[in-house]
Amino acid sequence: MASNQVLAGFHAVQARLRHAPDSIVDLYVDTSRQDQRMRHCIQQIEAAGVRWHAVDATRLDGLARGMRHQGIVALAHPRALAITVDEVLDTLEDQAEPALFLVLDGVTDPHNLGACLRTADAAGVHAVIAPRDRAVGLNATVQRVACGAADTVPYIMVTNLARTLRAMRQRDVWLVGADDAAERSIHQVDSRRAMAWVMGAEGEGMRRLTRETCDELAAIPMRGSVESLNVSVASAVCLYETARQRLLPD
């Protein structure tokens, strides 16, 4: 069990059933829950050929380790997605769509990371990148908050973030750092090229070396009294500005 991922709740379990049912080792269901959502999920489980066990809520509470499980918990092998930036870029070489990355410079809150992954999936991000030594990994809380996006968007943790960013620049990925003090707006950034949005950590922002490695800095226009946005909200604003621009006619 220690080597398996714990997937708790409908979103996380159903996403794994859709994308990699063979990775599920065991699945546990509270059959005292008889609503339509649970019946539909059991149908999906059985259609995928995954074995499941009827257990009580107390057993599920222990398996979920404090997470909200909604009556369903799966134990699964970690799913293999792309593990390097080069691997992602190589797969995009023959596609018309330019690369889009989200770089998180030290996000340590699993709820923020889960929300970032969920937005990244929705906005068409090809991979999320973070430093290995000062960021949260794909733990069970991240899996739950991401609502299945951790199974679709590669989360690549790198030993040296600045070195990785320089390597991305060598492969023509434009690096844009979100910075409240920047003179240019995110709406002035050309998001139609291969690019990465670089976001700072909660409260601290980007590290100096990360900021200096960016090709340009851009600010989210703020018209109210608050000075900054939560990193997951800021990521969503930046990513959807890119999505908007890429829908515009040439």
Image (spheres, helix red, strand yellow):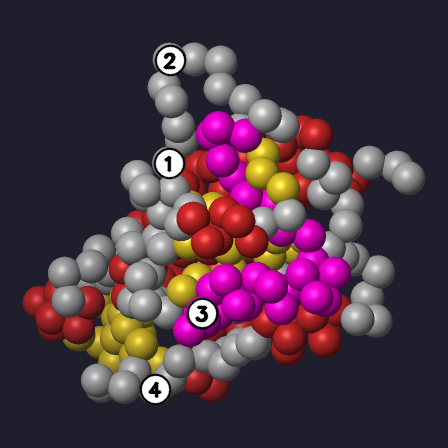
* 221 and 19: which is toward the camera: 221
For the residues labelled 2 and 1, the Cα–Cα distance comes to 14 Å
Q: Is residue 158 magenta?
A: yes
* Disc number lying in front (2 or 3): 3
**Quick one: label 4, few (<14), some, or many (20+) residues within 10 Å?**
some
Label 2 vs 4, first from the N-terminus: 4
Q: Quadrant of residue 9?
A: bottom left
Q: Is residue 169 visible?
A: yes
Q: Is residue 184 left or right of residue 152?
A: right
Write the start and end of the magenta stretch as one range.
155-182
> Residue at coordinates 50% horizontally, 62% vertically from top-left?
162
Crowd around label 1: few <14 · some 14–19 · many ≥20 (10 Å):
few
- Is-magenta flag for residue 111? no
* Residue 235 screen position, x and y as percent: 50, 42
Describe the element under mark 1 as helix, strand or loop.
loop
- The image shows residue 132, relative to residue 190, as above or below, that is below
Q: Amino acid at mark 1?
A: Asn
Give x and y (percent) for residue 242: 67, 41
Label 4 and label 1: CA atoms lie apart by 36 Å
Q: Depth-wise, is mark 4 or mark 3 nearer the camera? A: 3
* 243 sits to left or right of 95: left
- Of all residues, the one furthest to the right in this rendering is 250
| Chain-order first, disc 2 or disc 1 | 2
Q: Secondary structure at mark 4?
A: strand
Q: Which residue is mark 3?
A: 160
Where is mark 2, residue-wise? 225
